[in-house]
Amino acid sequence: MKKYLSVFKISFQQEFAYRVNFIMWRIRNVLQLFLVFFLWDTVFSGQDKVIFGYDKARILTYVFGLLIIRAFVLSARAVDVAGEVANGDLSNYLIKPVSYFKYWLTRDLSSKALNLIFAAFETAVLFIILKPPFFIQTNIISLTGFFVSTALAMFIYFTILFISSAIPFWIPEVAWGAQFLTTAIFIEFLSGAVFPLDILPQVFQNILNLTPFPYMIFFPLEVYLGKIAGLDLLKGVVISFIWAIILWIGMNSLWKKGLKVYQSQGR
Amino acid sequence: MDKTIIVDHLVKNFEITKREKGLISGISTLFSPQKKIVRALKGISFSIEQGELVGFIGPNGAGKTTTLKILSGLLFPTEGFTQVMGFDPWERNPEFLKQISLVMGQKNQLWWDLPAIETFELNKAIYEIPEKKYKDSLQELVSLLEVENLLNIQVRRLSLGQRMRLELVASLLHQPKVMFLDEPTIGLDIIAQKKIRDFMSDFNRKNGATILLTSHNMDDVSQLAKRVIVIDKGQILFDGKIAELVNSFAKNKMIKIYFSKEIDIKKLESIGKIKKIDMPEVTLSVPRETSTLAAAELLQNYPIADLNIEEEPIEDVIRRVFKGELKAKK
């Protein structure tokens, strides 16, 4: 797919177009890491405390992992899609022999690749300076589970984003609101991006585990930490895989309907 | 002859939500939206042959852009039949998309933060243009539109006219067989307009491309199109040679008179409307049907050296088209 390789390339260049902006963003990331580190380092200082089943190494790894996974899963260029549907920029792609979905998926992957390079570098620097007691997972099954579930997480988030981006086909003026509702409210809270979900009552957790949300952040992280393994790991991967398929089908049929009422506005 | 574009009884309705001004009514529409059907196209039919350059004209909101969008597969037609090069546009078959181009004067595809050449390279990949064809095509377009020096400048730093020419390059790199141009010269200065016009006429001749063009620019229409389709309120009022447009729609004729002696000009007003006075020359506008009568009367009662009856200038007719003043003839 040479087409999408070119999309990947140009997207990469686009990221560098605002250099100062880019540098500031990376600095913010590093500062955030320091802040979080010192906060939890203080909370767990002294004795071998265990809170909610997390010891110091694990909570630090959870929090760091959170920052990194967030940067991958929840950072998506495709947040612009709703705006493009509402203001008619979508037309630019529809008249070309290119799949709009694959186009944005590629742009996302390109943005994520860039993120990965810098995040790896920053984490390395941090490691050298702070020498934190990180929990390094060595179990090959857990690591594989982690990578598989992270890939599924990205796909799930991406399809949810595309589904909410289809709302402006019918109500063009809610472009921003629709995004906000899905990303900020549902995903932030229900995915474990704000707090580890296992501090919630068991009943909630059981219900939540049937929705796609925990599989976006919480599940991959817990798999890495080794807190979810064996049969639970398999069950989680199967559930998120099923969700990925359901969302993919839902997204396709929604977009098919949406394009029929698309008005290609803004002239 | 090959019919490249066929449109038959095409209907397009839009459902829009009515809005009223003011906060209270704004909130009430939020809860009980008032839907309204707008009939943008009311069953239009026409066909275009390969290599034709057709001007699509009419006042704002007549349905021109809607037609172009349906023909390029952006909008789903409510009723009727459309076919472009044997394809149903709505299916958006990649083979179809590779052969068409839609240029909208107010939409841009160039990547704002990057030099235009990057967008060209991207389009090369998207349209799967072979290296050699891409180089030739780029070379040709760049020299025709005189944009050699602009390729490596960040798009955001360019003027509108420069950008528009680069937009055209981006839209035509794949050498489309059918081009839909929607107001391609809008907002440009006269020199840039002329460059684009010259280019389109060249492109049409050299590549045998079929071009359907909408414009509010008189010169675009009168200099480029041999055939025009006049559309208003979703209906076709006229479809034919631009010369015949005058015959069909001109209500008046112009009588140009050279007087041999000074006369009282005010008296002429009883015969027709005075358009221009440049003594000894006077131009009168008179109703078509009575133009010969008026001429006879003039010759009888005034000292006249010469007299000509002329058609209303084409520009005047087209201007009336843009204003929506034309009515369909019985």
Image (cartoon, rainbow, N blue to C red):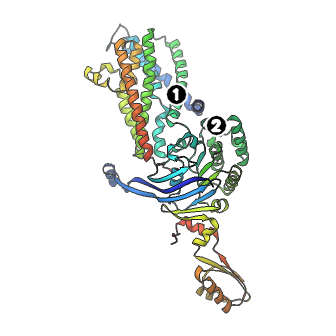
**What's the residue at 54%, 16% (across, down)?**
A125
Q: Is residue A267 visible?
A: no
Q: Tell me the SS state at disc 1.
A: helix
- Residue A56 placement: quadrant: top left
* Quadrant into which the N terminus of chain A falls: top right
Above or below, B62 relative to B278 = above
Single out the mark in the foreground, 2 or 1.
2
At label 2, which amino acid type do we have? Lys
Choose between B225 and B315: the one closer to the eye: B225
| Amino acid type shown at disc 1 | Leu
A190 sits left or right of B49 in the view: left
* Above or below, comparing residue B38 to residue A50 in the picture: below
Q: Which residue is mark 1?
A: A109
- Determine which quarter of the picture holds residue A82: top left
How much space separates mark 2 and mark 1, taking CA atoms? Answer: 21 Å
How many C-alpha atoms fall within 10 Å of the one at disc 1: few (<14), some, or many (≥20)? some
Relative to B31, B307 lies left or right: right
Q: Position of residue B201 (x, y in %)?
A: 69, 55
Chain of the residue that carries numbered disc 1 in the rendered image: A
Q: How many other residues sit within 10 Å of disc 2, few (<14), some (14-19) or many (≥20)? A: many
Residue to which mark 2 is pinned: B124
Determine whether, in the image, residue B304 is placed left or right of residue B102. Answer: right
Dividing the picture into quarters, in which one does residue A209 lie? top left
Residue at mark 2: chain:
B
Discs 2, 1: same chain: no
Q: Is residue B261 visible?
A: yes
